[in-house]
Image (cartoon, coloured by chain):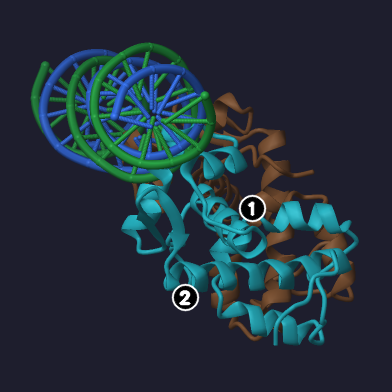
Chain colours: A brown, B cyan, C green, D blue
DNA sequence: AACATCTTTAGCACAGTCCTAAGAAATGGA
DNA sequence: TCCATTTCTTAGGACTGTGCTAAAGATGTT
């Protein structure tokens, strides 16, 4: 299973960036914001968003960028795996930041169905190493 | 740390394919063998080997392909991480084959220094889920 | 209306992965 | 030794993903 990730690392970063901005800020996202937060130029960001849109994860209406329901779901799945694996790598001795940085390289490959399995193998921790809560 | 893998997935597969063939067969490896074992055509394999050679992992002499000492070291490092993570994912409930397939997607990203840390967090298991021994 | 900002298009570049077709080199057999 | 087969290499093409600049088009603010 989970042999072919249906997105690239950059697409993963973009999805999570949008997800996090949507969570934390009131405003609708614009292309320039996405570009800035990914440290790429707007035309590059546009192309990236185009790929994400064609996969059904992102919607663009009159320049305003938002995640589709399936995009939000995908982001939540990646985040769940991310936090679960962070806990594991922190338990191996990495700092929270190192664990985060390492896991970010491949969390999107692992597949959301692994999250509960990993968490239960770790004794269902309630927080990731940074202190953020891990959903049930 | 370990932020930029110094090889691609394909290069990782090639390195390990050569490593395993060197271990198990009477030698020496040829281009066609590498191509066959990676299921690609010889010109594609040649290009891949060229990249690996320019990174100092592979040596080609009169058509015979072998790993350099640093290639062997890199392969051992990836394998150590591979087996350590296999143990972990098997403990999460994956079959040996599923764990192997999953871990193969990102073991080369993790970096060899993690292997002992992972193993010790898992209580220093002596075998991977397939039954192969894990070195001290 | 004018200016600033934002989006989009067009064009280019480069790495990595893959192929086919054909020429060059090596090998093994008779 | 010579030929045939196999192997290696070169040359060319293709496509994805990632990035850029420059300029055109849209939008919005004053």
Residue carrying label 2:
B1
Whether residue A128 can be seen here: no
Residue B130, compared with residue A20, is above or below; it is below
Whether residue D9 sits left or right of residue A65 in the image: it is left
Check disc 2 and report its element: helix, strand or loop. loop
Q: Quadrant of residue C25?
A: top left
What residue appears at the point 44 percent right and 73 percent down from the top-left corner?
A: B69
Q: Which mark is residue B79?
A: none
Whether residue A104 sits left or right of residue D20 in the image: it is right
What residue appears at the point 76 percent right and 85 percent down from the top-left corner?
A: B121
What residue appears at the point 36 percent right and 50 percent down from the top-left corner?
A: B51
Q: Nearer the viewer, mark 1 or mark 2?
A: 1
Q: Quadrant of residue B126?
A: bottom right
Whether residue B50 sits left or right of residue D17 in the image: it is left
Q: Residues within 10 Å of mark 1 (few under 14, many from 20)?
A: many
Sequence-wise first label, 1 or 2: 2
Whether residue B55 can be seen here: yes
Residue carrying label 1:
B105
The quadrant of the rendering that contains the C terminus of chain B is: bottom right
In front of the other: B95 or B21: B21
Residue B17, compared with residue B85, is above or below; it is above
Percent of width and height locating residue A41: 30, 42
Count of numbered circles on the image: 2
Q: Residues within 10 Å of mark 2 (few under 14, many from 20)?
A: few
Residue B49, compared with residue A83, is above or below; it is above
In front of the other: D30 or B65: B65
């Amino acid at each position: 299973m989970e042999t072919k990730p249906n997105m690239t690392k950059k697409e993963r970063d973009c999805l999570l960036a949008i997800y996090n901005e949507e969570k934390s800020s009131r405003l609708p996202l614009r292309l320039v914001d996405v570009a800035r937060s990914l440290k790429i130029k707007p035309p590059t960001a546009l192309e990236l968003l185009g790929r994400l849109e064609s996969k059904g994860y992102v919607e663009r209406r009159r320049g305003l960028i938002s995640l589709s329901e399936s995009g939000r779901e995908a982001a939540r799945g990646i985040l769940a795996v991310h936090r679960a694996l962070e806990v594991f790598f922190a338990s191996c001795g990495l700092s929270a930041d190192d664990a985060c940085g390492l896991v970010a390289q491949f969390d999107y490959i692992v597949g959301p169905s692994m999250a509960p399995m990993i968490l239960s193998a770790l004794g269902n921790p309630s927080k990731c190493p940074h202190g953020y809560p891990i959903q049930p």
